Amino acid sequence: MSSPSDADVIRRSLGVPEAFGMIYDRHAATLLRFLGRRAGARVAEGLLGDLFRIAFERRTTFDPSRASALPWLYGIGGNLLAKHRRAEARWLRAGARVAAGEATDGRVSAAALDARLLFPRVADAIEALPDDEREALLLFAWEELSYQSMADALQVPIGTVRSRLNRARARLRELIEPNGKDKVKAR
Amino acid sequence: MKPVDLARKLRREAAFDPAALERGKAVLMAAIRQAVEPRRRPTVVPQVPYADIRAALAFLERAFGFREISTARFVSADGELLHATVEVGDSLIGVGGQGHHGAISPLSGGAESQFISVQVDDIDAHYQRAVAAGARIANELRDHSWGERTYWALDLEGHRWRFGQQMGEVPR
């Protein structure tokens, strides 16, 4: 016997609220890692319970034609992160320093120096994106969601997801390489 | 390198407290329980009159840890706070204006005719908190022959509160 889909579980939780605990057991670890990648452990741990509490309270709004609740939960998580933009920016900059450190790895070559300069600029560029474009970019690049899942998470049509992603790419290219030349190479 | 690949390089995993998942689940299950069984109303609710309700609420929270139920406020049409309710463990206490319903604050009455006895989990911490908040201690912390540890305090307007914790077995 196959286990019930998320949609089945959520439908059941309308009559038997405790059933919603299974949604937590299935997805909490994934959402905790998502929140952590975005804003660090402390913010993530603080938001995790709220995310699922809000999901529970809004469970009637879940689209039952979707088998998995994961994109819907990503959407709720993304909204919660909106109040923690400063923690996000700090975490992103710290990530840039780590990436630069890994790329240079103690070497003093020209490429290593370039990397040290490059990653903080990538962080700044991501930071400078409009919220909806940054959200799309990070769901795609970090969470590796499909276009369909992103559309479900952001509650917009797939076409909108594509155009946000394209705009984000173009803006990043511009912000990272202001004079349009590919003079900075990362390794 | 392409923009998306560059962005990928900044992806960084956080290191979590191993208990984080458990704590998150507790938050969810508490919300679920509340949905399943709405708040039970205690049979008896003491109503305590004050000359200044707002000051009393702030003090009761700061000194004794009584939390106001913000949705239970009664406010008059011109914005005057008439009555509030605070939560104390599984009990409720009403905080109202004096003069209504014939009850007055010791501040104007000059004497208390009752006191309220409250059981707490950590009497020493509770005592420290009350002292730090400026509560007047009427009877210092002490242990009783029946195994209870208590102290007595007066609030801003002179209402008398008795706080106790049963420390061990009740001797027979």
Image (tube, coloured by chain):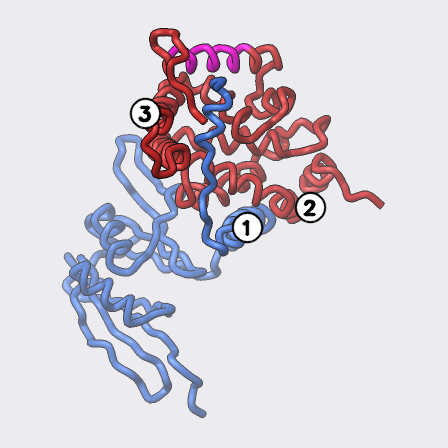
Chain colours: A red, B blue
Task: Please identify the residue farthest to the bottom as the structure is shown.
Answer: B172
Q: Residue B25 has which mark?
A: 1
Residue B58 spot, x, y in % from top left: 24, 50
- SS type, badge 2: loop
Q: Amino acid at mark 3?
A: Leu
Q: Does label 3 or label 2 sit earlier along the sequence? A: 2
Q: Amino acid at mark 2?
A: Val
User: Toward the viewer: A66 or B139?
Assistant: A66
Q: At 39% across and 55% down in the image, what residue appears?
A: B87
Distance between mark 3 and mark 2 Cα atoms: 55 Å
Q: Residue B145 has which mark?
A: none
Q: Residue A117 has which mark?
A: 3
Q: At 52% across and 37% down in the image, what residue appears?
A: A54
Residue A148 lies, with reference to residue A91, above or below; the image says above
Residue B79 spot, x, y in % from top left: 27, 33
Task: Please identify the residue farthest to the front as the structure is shown.
Answer: A109
